Image: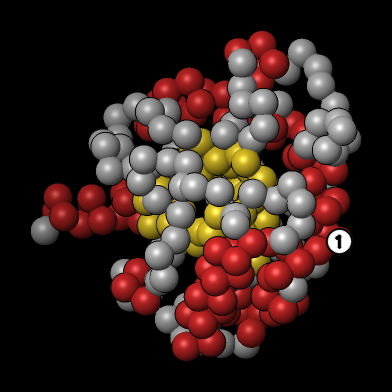
């Protein structure tokens, strides 16, 4: 699959909603990630963010729960990034949850997506962020219906027992996921959050450069310097 966004660089929202988003200079962003797993954003925040975002919005789901994924997809997001996928079987369960028949079992209804014309086939990205997931990367990336794999380097470093994301084993893990994704013909991405990690990353379709909180901290520090 070819890169879907005008730039691989994305900003990861964890606290900011639609009103604050409108004021951000997002010319450099190709996409936005909305984190429903960590931070304080909820499914109900997605519609407002979708209305004002100048770029496609991907939601990082809170879990692999089928009912939760349905609520997220019903908002009309361009795709979901699903945390902690550890096997091809788990990936197949996500396909069943996220795809309408005959590909999966997602139901339809009078959702925002149906009413405003959300994407017919939102992207489904499985997160590889455990030693188990890394070992099963071929099965996850190769699972029919999965559009890509997205690394969570912070959880991966914890799972591998490594001290930081710039550790050789974690970086090799990210590179392995990128190679496996290329072999399977699906997208590859990662969260970064580290200016030391950035130069070590392989070419990727999606890089969540950092969070909205990091952007606020950098902006405040620069203003007050
Ligand atoms: C991780 O690094 O574990 C992530 O989930 C990024 O948000
Ligand atoms: Mg994680």
Residue 33 coordinates in the image, percent (x, y): 50, 45
In the image, 181 versus 159, the foreground residue is 181
Residue 209 in sight from this viewpoint: yes
- Left or right: residue 199 compared with residue 180: left
Q: Residue 97 placed where, x, y %?
A: 82, 41
Element type where label 1 sits in the image:
helix
Other residues around mark 1 within 10 Å, as few (<14) / some (14–19) / many (≥20): some
The reply to whether residue 67 is in sight is no
At x 66% / y 11%, what residue is drawn?
Answer: 115
Pinpoint residue 206: horizontal percent, then vertical percent. Answer: 46, 54
Q: Position of residue 165 (x, y in %)?
A: 47, 78
The residue positioned 62% from the left and 87% from the top of the image is: 161
Q: Residue under circle 1? A: 89
Residue 24's place in the image compared with 215, above or below, is above
Q: Quadrant of residue 193?
A: bottom left
Residue at image location 55% in from the left, 54% down from the top: 187
Can you tell me whether the CB of the residue at mark 1 lies under 8 Å from the nearest atom of ligand 2? no
Q: Nearer the viewer, residue 220 or 97?
A: 97
Q: Nearer the viewer, residue 182 or 199?
A: 182
- Which one is nearer the viewer's eye here, 204 or 161? 204
Scheme of image coloration: secondary structure
């Amino acid at each position: 699959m070819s890169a879907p966004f005008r730039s691989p660089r994305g900003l990861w929202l964890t606290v900011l909603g639609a009103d604050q988003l409108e004021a951000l200079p997002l010319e450099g962003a190709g996409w936005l990630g909305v984190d429903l797993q960590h931070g304080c954003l909820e499914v109900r925040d997605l519609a407002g963010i979708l209305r004002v975002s100048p770029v496609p919005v991907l939601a990082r789901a809170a879990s692999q729960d089928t009912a939760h994924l349905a609520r997220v997809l019903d908002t009309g997001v361009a795709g979901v990034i699903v945390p902690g996928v550890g096997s091809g079987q788990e990936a197949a369960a996500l396909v069943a949850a996220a795809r309408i028949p005959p590909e999966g079992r997602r139901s339809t209804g009078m959702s925002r997506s149906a009413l405003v014309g959300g994407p017919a086939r939102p992207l489904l990205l499985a997160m590889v962020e455990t030693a188990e997931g890394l070992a099963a990367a071929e099965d996850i990336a190769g699972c029919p219906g999965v559009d890509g794999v997205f690394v969570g380097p912070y959880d991966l470093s914890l799972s591998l027992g490594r001290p930081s994301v710039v550790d050789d084993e974690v970086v090799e893990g990210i590179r392995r996921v990128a190679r496996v994704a290329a072999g399977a013909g699906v997208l590859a991405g990662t969260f970064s959050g580290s200016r030391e990690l950035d130069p070590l990353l392989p070419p990727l379709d999606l890089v969540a450069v950092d969070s909205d909180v990091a952007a606020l901290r950098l902006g405040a520090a620069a203003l007050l310097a």
